[in-house]
Image (tube, coloured by chain):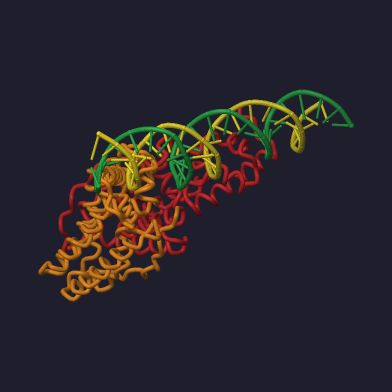
Chain colours: A orange, B red, C yellow, D green
DNA sequence: ACGCTAACGGACGCCACCGTCCACTTCGCT
DNA sequence: AGCGAAGTGGACGGTGGCGTCCGTTAGCGT
């Protein structure tokens, strides 16, 4: 059933993915399918035959970032100092999402049927949860931190929209530093409000 | 030459604004003008005659929130303890924006020609800048805080999208608490990355 | 070299939103 | 009550994105 693609077809597929990556990274997911096709130098029909739904295109286009996500948490877990590992996860995650705004949308289940994304997301969250437990035990991370705070952070991070990628990354870097400050266990801590039940992002 | 509106016209104008407030608060600014007109029970022409551009409708619809913004910073300035006043500003601002997602978009110059908004925004920022200086002098606010951090926070806060207003407000509350932790002057502080030049929000 | 067929992309119809025009209605003044 | 002007909303043409159809092109196996 899944015949190997013909050479030109494979070529086009690659060019479509390149175009999608470039456009999604630069402008987010709202770019029209047509635009992707135009940039790839193919007709709309070709794009739709290769990726019948936008979701599939998005999933394929952000496969690299999804892998990067995994690498980030794995590196965090591997770090000898759990708290430092946790900080690295926060910093790199923020930067990753700042560099690819569209990725955040996809990651956040703005497209709810993204099975692959959901699985990878769950894996990353579980791993970072383990890391967080260790960091708390080591005393670096505040005891009342919960995983929801990390999701909160990623959602918040996506709110940071600047004109250029450079500016966005810079802003995100400072944001990450502030977040780490907030997460750090400190003698002068005050209790936090309860964690809200963070459902999927609203369409607004 | 601005004749007072006829009674029915005034009535319609009010209903249009009510509809706009309800829809903008519930779904953000992306709602079609038609939808506002439909909800207000008027024709599209009426809506367009009263508010030729969406910008004007938005500005009018969020006049209350804009006033609330002013009140928040004024209350903050009036507080005997500058640091506590600053915290109140952060908390109330986050809640205000969480309650009216569309307001954040407007406030953030997503519609760049919003003169009224720009002026009010500038006033609020100047006032809160003064408050921040006092809070820093009093020792509550970290010395390397800058106004850009507050804008960063508002932008980040808008990223928090939850299904219901209640959930969004709850999430925003916890976020505000974390932010305050981050802003608090502390003995165990680490230097922050530089403040990025935060231009207007990107279209993405 | 040649034909079979996968693959292509221009063109089409559909729908939603936009902003404007105009024939009809309603207010408000005398 | 009656008239002029302000006000109204249905209807229209334009634009842009969407997903699909089909006549044509070009890879690849013989």
- Which of the image's four quarters has the N terminus of chain B? top right
Q: Nearer the viewer, residue B75 or A97?
A: A97
- Give the percent coordinates (x, y) of residue A67: 22, 59
**Residue B118 picture location, percent across and down:** 40, 39
Q: Is residue A115 visible?
A: yes
Judge from the rendering whether residue D7 lies leftward or rightward of residue B155; answer left or right.
right
Viewer-closest of B48 and A97: A97
Q: With respect to residue A16, does A122 lie above or below?
A: below
Number of numbered discs on residues: 0
A34 over B166 or under it: above or below:
above
Q: Is residue A88 left or right of residue D20?
A: left
Q: Position of residue A121 (x, y in %)?
A: 29, 64
Quarter the C terminus of chain B occupies? top left
Query: Is any part of residue B131 visible from this angle?
Result: no
**Residue sitting at 61 percent across and 48 percent down?**
B39
Which residue is painted at 20% across and 53% down in the image? B143
Name the residue: 57% across, 42% down: B34
Nearer-the-camera pick, B137 or B177: B177
Percent x, y for residue B52?
55, 34
């Amino acid at each position: 059933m899944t015949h190997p693609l013909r050479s030109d077809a494979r070529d086009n597929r690659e060019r479509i993915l390149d175009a999608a990556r470039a456009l999604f990274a630069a402008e987010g997911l709202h770019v029209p399918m047509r635009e992707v096709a135009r940039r790839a130098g193919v007709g709309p029909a070709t794009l739709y035959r290769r990726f019948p739904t936008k979701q599939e295109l998005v999933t394929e286009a952000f496969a690299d970032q999804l892998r990067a996500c995994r690498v980030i948490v794995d590196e965090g877990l591997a770090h000898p100092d759990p708290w430092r590992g946790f900080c690295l996860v926060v910093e790199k995650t923020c930067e990753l999402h700042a560099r690819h705004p569209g990725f955040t949308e996809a990651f956040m289940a703005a497209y709810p049927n993204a099975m692959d994304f959901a699985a990878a997301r769950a894996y990353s969250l579980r791993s970072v949860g383990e890391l967080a437990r260790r960091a708390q035990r080591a005393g670096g991370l505040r005891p009342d931190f919960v995983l929801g705070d990390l999701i909160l952070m990623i959602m918040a991070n996506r709110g940071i929209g600047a004109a250029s990628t450079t500016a966005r990354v810079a802003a995100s870097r400072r944001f990450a530093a502030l977040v780490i400050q907030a997460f750090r266990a400190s003698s002068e801590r005050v209790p936090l409000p309860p964690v809200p039940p963070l459902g999927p992002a609203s369409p607004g």
